[in-house]
Amino acid sequence: MKIFVIAEREQPVVELCAGARQFAGEVDLIALPTTSVALGVADTVYRLEVPEGRMMEDSYLALVDLIEKEKPAAVFAESSRRIQLLLGRVAARVGGSVISNVTALPSAKDSTTMYFGGLANRKYKGADDTTSFYFVRPATFPDAEPSGENAEVELPFIEPAYEVKLDSVGPHVKGDVDLPSAKRIVSVGRGIKEEKDLEMVRELCSLIDAELGCSRSIYEAESWLPKEALVGISGSTVVPDLYLTLGISGQAQHMVACDGATTIMCVNTDPYALIFEHSDYGSKGDLYTVVPRMIEYFKAHPLK
């Protein structure tokens, strides 16, 4: 069996190649010009050519040609906007099924996905005679290990009949938050009363070397933090060693994006909050009391 992997960031490259290796004797990576390729993850690395000034979506015919020739059983993909646009066109041309929000893959043709914002799961079975395209969520293959020689092959650009043209370019203000790569995350929710109170949380983050995240209410309703800080079904999916929530209720739309964390801790004054059902450790104290005490402790006992 052969499985293709397509991803941009190094962490998904490693994880998806490792997951594919559990099912396939041959694992090949399709590398975009933006892809960060780790060593020893695939048998073959196909370097996709995209001419300067052209949109990434215009390179889809090269992938169509490759898939029709090699006939992989499946394509495991990182769910980035660029890859979604690219593979949507590819799947339509080769007649493959596209399955998103995949949380489990018992085999290369069986998948479990979440829907209704993570409130339920649905199982799919891919057809044996076509390539199945899976957009796989982080932490789906936590214990798998990649392997391969990374033999490189150039994948030449094929001119499409119709070109995607760039109409205009506008500024995109992006924060310096990198939640998917963080080892520790402190996330805040409705329990934070005022924007200025985020400063004490930032101080705690600096003491424990953590990134600051938030629930949808803080990003959307209050606009106190950028989109990059949002954890949830419409934001980032995270898999840190520690995920500490402050004043977050624990709704499914949030928890599906952080339940891959090694340890989840919560602070919430509501003893019936759903967050306690998902947490390894919980405090029913007021975050305005708990956080200053944590700051005091870590100032006296710095992390090594």
Image: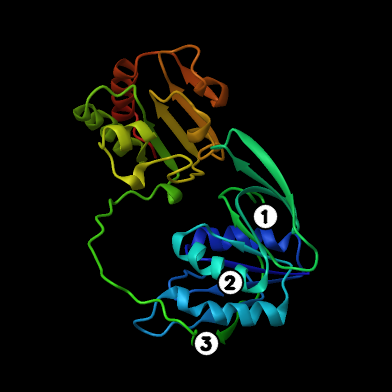
Q: Quadrant of residue 128?
A: bottom right
Instruction: Quote the CA–CA distance across marks 2 and 3.
Output: 13 Å
Position of the C terminus by quadrant: top left
The answer to whether residue 38 of the structure is visible from this angle is no
Label annotation for residue 90: 2
As shown in the figure, which amino acid type bears the numbered disc 3?
Answer: Ile
As shown in the figure, which amino acid type bears the numbered disc 2?
Answer: Val
The answer to whether residue 270 of the structure is visible from this angle is yes
Q: Quadrant of residue 155?
A: bottom right
Instruction: Quote the CA–CA distance across marks 1 and 3.
Output: 35 Å
Residue at point 35% right, 43% down? 229
Nearest to N terminus: mark 2 or mark 3: 2
Instruction: Quote the CA–CA distance across marks 1 and 2.
Output: 28 Å
Q: Residues within 10 Å of mark 3 (few under 14, many from 20)?
A: some
Residue toward you, 219 or 170: 170
Q: Position of residue 110 (x, y in %)?
A: 75, 53
**Dot 3 corresponds to which residue?**
158
Residue at point 61% right, 78% down? 64
**Dot 1 corresponds to which residue?**
144
Mark closer to the observer (1, 2) = 2
Q: Position of residue 40 (x, y in %)?
A: 61, 71
Residue toward you, 53 or 298: 53
